[in-house]
C-alpha cells in the first residue's frame, strides 16, 4: 500500500502518521482501514499490499504479510496484489488469502533469479499476474530491451497456460529527472507490446516518471494520458493524487476516436 495524502483538510488529523509502514508496525487499524477505503472510494480496482519496508528480516516480513492480508480483506472485497521483492513473502501472502472473497494478484514476475516460480504460483492460485521488464542482471536500457524481456516472460506464461486476460505487463517507467529519454523508452515499449499482444493488459508505475520534480501531479497526468494513447489500459497510481475517473473517460473517448469502440457503445454505456 502506498501512503495517501487526502485533499479534504478534515482528514488531516487522521494522517499524522504519514507512512504506512509506521501504521503497520503500530497495528493502527483505524489508519489502515482509512487508507484502503480512501483508495476504494475514488475508484481503485486493485489494492497493492507490500510489507518490504516493515522489516529486513525475511521471516518477519512473511509474518507481516500473513497478518495484513486478512485485515485488508475484512476492509474490501477488491483484488489485493501481493507484492514483495522476496518470492517467499508472496507465497506467505497467497497462503493467507481468502479466495472466496476475491482473486489475488501477484506483483511481480521478471527475469531475475528466483522470480520465475511466481508463474507457477499464479496458475496454482488462479491469480492475476503482473510482469515487469527487468532483465536477468540489470534494468532495460531502451524500449527494445523492455520488449525482449517481456516477450521471454510471455513465453514462460504460455507454457504454464496463464490466460491472456490475467497478464499485466509493466515496461517499467523511470524518473525523467534522471534521463530525458526514459519516458520515450517506456512509451515506445508500450506501443510495441500493444501491437504484439493486443489482449494483454499493459500498465506501469506511472508516478515514477515525476520523482524528484515539483508539482508531480501535472507531470503524472501528462504521462498517464500519453501512456493511454500509446496503449496502456491499466494504471498503477495514487488514486487520491491522480483520481482515475478522468483517465477512464479519456481512455474510452480515445478508443472511440481510434475506431476501437464499435458505434461508441462502450463510451455511451459508461456515461449513461
Image: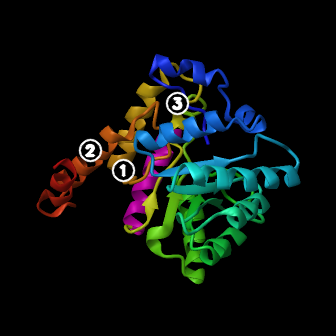
How many marks do you count on the picture?
3
**Viewed as shown, does residue 260 lie left or right of 213?**
left
- Please provide percent x and percent y for residue 165: 44, 69
Q: Could you say which disc has been placed on residue 210 in the image?
A: 3
In what element is the residue under mark 2? helix
* 176 vs 191: above or below: above
Residue 19 lies, in percent from the top left, at 68, 30
Would residue 74 be found to the left or right of residue 183 on screen?
Answer: right
Secondary structure under the numbered disc 3 in the rendered image: helix
Q: Earlier in the sequence, mark 1 or mark 2?
A: 1
Q: Which residues are magenta?
A: 181-197
Callout in the foreground (2, 3): 2
Looking at marks 2 and 3 on the same chain, the residue that comes earlier in the sequence is marked by 3
The stretch drawn in magenta includes residue 20: no
Residue at coordinates 22% horizontally, 52% vertically from top-left?
Answer: 270
Tags 1 and 2 in contact by the CB under 8 Å rule? no
Q: Give the camera-side residue of 224 and 17.
A: 17
In the picture shown, does residue 145 fall above or below 222? Answer: below
Element under label 1? helix
Q: Residues within 10 Å of mark 3 (few under 14, many from 20)?
A: many
Q: Which residue is mark 2?
A: 249
Between marks 1 and 2, how big is the CA–CA gap?
Answer: 16 Å
Quickly name the residue at label 1: 230
Q: CA distance from mark 2 to mark 3?
A: 23 Å
Q: Nearer the viewer, mark 1 or mark 2?
A: 2
For the point 67% across and 35% down, which residue is it? 20
Q: Main secondary structure of the magenta part?
A: helix
**CB atoms of marks 3 and 1 within 8 Å:** no
Amino acid at each position: 500500500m502506498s501512503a495517501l495524502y487526502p485533499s479534504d483538510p478534515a482528514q488531516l488529523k487522521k494522517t499524522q502518521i504519514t507512512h504506512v509502514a509506521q501504521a503497520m508496525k503500530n497495528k493502527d487499524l483505524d489508519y489502515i482501514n482509512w487508507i484502503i477505503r480512501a483508495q476504494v472510494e475514488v475508484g481503485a480496482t486493485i489494492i497493492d499490499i507490500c510489507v518490504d519496508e516493515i522489516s529486513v528480516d525475511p521471516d518477519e516480513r512473511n509474518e507481516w504479510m500473513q497478518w495484513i492480508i486478512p485485515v485488508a480483506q475484512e476492509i474490501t472485497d477488491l483484488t489485493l496484489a501481493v507484492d514483495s521483492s522476496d518470492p517467499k513473502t508472496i507465497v506467505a501472502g497467497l497462503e493467507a488469502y481468502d479466495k472466496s472473497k476475491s482473486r489475488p494478484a501477484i506483483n511481480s514476475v521478471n527475469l531475475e533469479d528466483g522470480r520465475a516460480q511466481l508463474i507457477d504460483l499464479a496458475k496454482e492460485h488462479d491469480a492475476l499476474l503482473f510482469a515487469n521488464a527487468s532483465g536477468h542482471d540489470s534494468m532495460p536500457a531502451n524500449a527494445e530491451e523492455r520488449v525482449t524481456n517481456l516477450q521471454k516472460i510471455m513465453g514462460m506464461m504460455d507454457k504454464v497456460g496463464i490466460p491472456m486476460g490475467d497478464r499485466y505487463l509493466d515496461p517499467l517507467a523511470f524518473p525523467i529527472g534522471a534521463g530525458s529519454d526514459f519516458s520515450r523508452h517506456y512509451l515506445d515499449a508500450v506501443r510495441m507490446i500493444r501491437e504484439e499482444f493486443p489482449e494483454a493488459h499493459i500498465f506501469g508505475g506511472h508516478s515514477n516518471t515525476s520523482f524528484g520534480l515539483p508539482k508531480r501531479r501535472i507531470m503524472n497526468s501528462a504521462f498517464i494520458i500519453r501512456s493511454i494513447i500509446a496503449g496502456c489500459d491499466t494504471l498503477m497510481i495514487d488514486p487520491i493524487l491522480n483520481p482515475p475517473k478522468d483517465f477512464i473517460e479519456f481512455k474510452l473517448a480515445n478508443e472511440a476516436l481510434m475506431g476501437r469502440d464499435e458505434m461508441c457503445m462502450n463510451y455511451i454505456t459508461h456515461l449513461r
